[in-house]
Image: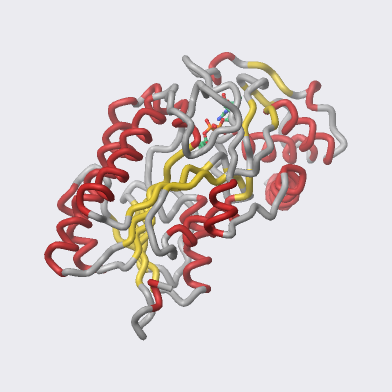
Amino acid sequence: MPSSRTSSPPVALITGVTGQDGSYLSTLLLDKGYVVHGLAPTHSFGLPVDPRVTTHHADLGEGTNLSAVIDQVAPAEVYHLGAQSHVKVSFELPVYTAEVTGLGTLRLLEAIRHHQARTGRQVRFYQASSSEMFGKAVETPQTEQTRFHPRSPYACAKVYAYWQTVNYREAYGMFACNGILFNHESPRRGEAFVTRKITRAATRIKLGLAHELRLGNLDACRDWGFAGDYVEAMWLMLQQNEPDDYVIATGETHSVREFLDEVFGYLELDWKKSVVIDPQFNRPSEVDLLRGDATKAREKLGWRPKVAFRELARMMVDADLKLAEQEAVIEKHR
Ligand code: F7E
């Protein structure tokens, strides 16, 4: 495999290391014997980083510091996961989202291109592309061939970053891949995303710590997989002989309502008694239905999702129940 060509351990750099995917990917790479470096913005309030990861504070909004980190770390592989990744927030901060999620990718690609030119060393690049690029999807299921129709400033920024990644591959022969990942969740998912918002609230309701859950559109359908499975696909893409783009998905779609059924049902609760529909959580333009076809990843990477919808929902509930129990103890001693 390319990463183990030399006898010294391979070096990887992960942007967005404090996020859900950064956290799972750090563990995966450390377990494989990599030396892992992570990029975290100075203002990050993300997850704790594994102490074996060397963290660098650099910002995707500024190119000079990215170049300095690339030169210092000299990574064999860069996993670009950093972004302003919340779709609803991108409607409120469209320019910031374009700067970080769109231009941030270009800044990083430029830093890598110059580093390669100076040192003659190849850097393999993974771009966290998103199913949101399909947006108002022209066909279902979506594949690598499906035309993009982005429906948010976030999705537009991701389309830009996708094409820059393809362009650097074609123009400069860079080993650059797009992983078009459909929604992927876990107990480490941020609480502003709908799955985790639901599992946090439902478990708190179960223990009497909360009584209400305010949500937007319950009819939206997503192809939800487990983040731990998806980071493995990222790594596999960078171990191939040729760079390419891959859809990563489960092939199943479920509505937010179905996720509520699953979570509250598992807790033996009726969500209709607690959920309040609140228009403030609606988006100006919604993505109604996403379902991915990961045939190419299965055939070329040998990748398959291991965790199914029900198992994923239950895994998240079990973890959040423990969190809620701790909160209940603190509450009791107040
Ligand atoms: O929303 C609906 C909402 O914010 C899912 C990001 O990781 O995956 C994620 O984007 C659906 C939407 O994820 C609430 O309208 C209803 O239809 O969990 P979400 P997302 O927008 O699909 C893709 C692949 C990415 O790349 C993104 O970075 O749920 N929904 N009520 C709600 N959503 C939220 N957040 N909060 C609600 O109260």
Q: Position of residue 58 (x, y in %)?
A: 26, 53
Mark yes or no: residue 262 visible: yes
Residue 96 is left or right of residue 259, and the answer is left
Count of labels in the image: 0
Mark yes or no: residue 326 visible: no
Q: Position of residue 196 (x, y in %)?
A: 63, 40
Q: Quadrant of residue 267?
A: top right
Residue 297 is left or right of residue 264, and the answer is left
Q: Nearer the viewer, residue 118 or 17?
A: 118
Viewport quadrant of the N terminus = bottom left
Q: Residue furthest bottom?
A: 7
Q: Position of residue 18 (x, y in %)?
A: 44, 53
Q: Nearer the viewer, residue 215 or 284?
A: 284
Q: Residue furthest right?
A: 268
Q: Position of residue 240 (x, y in %)?
A: 43, 63
Q: Nearer the viewer, residue 223 or 122?
A: 122
* Quarter of the rendered structure image containing ligand 1: top right
What residue sits 30% from the left and 67% below the top? 75
**Relative to residue 4, is residue 274 depicted above or below?**
above
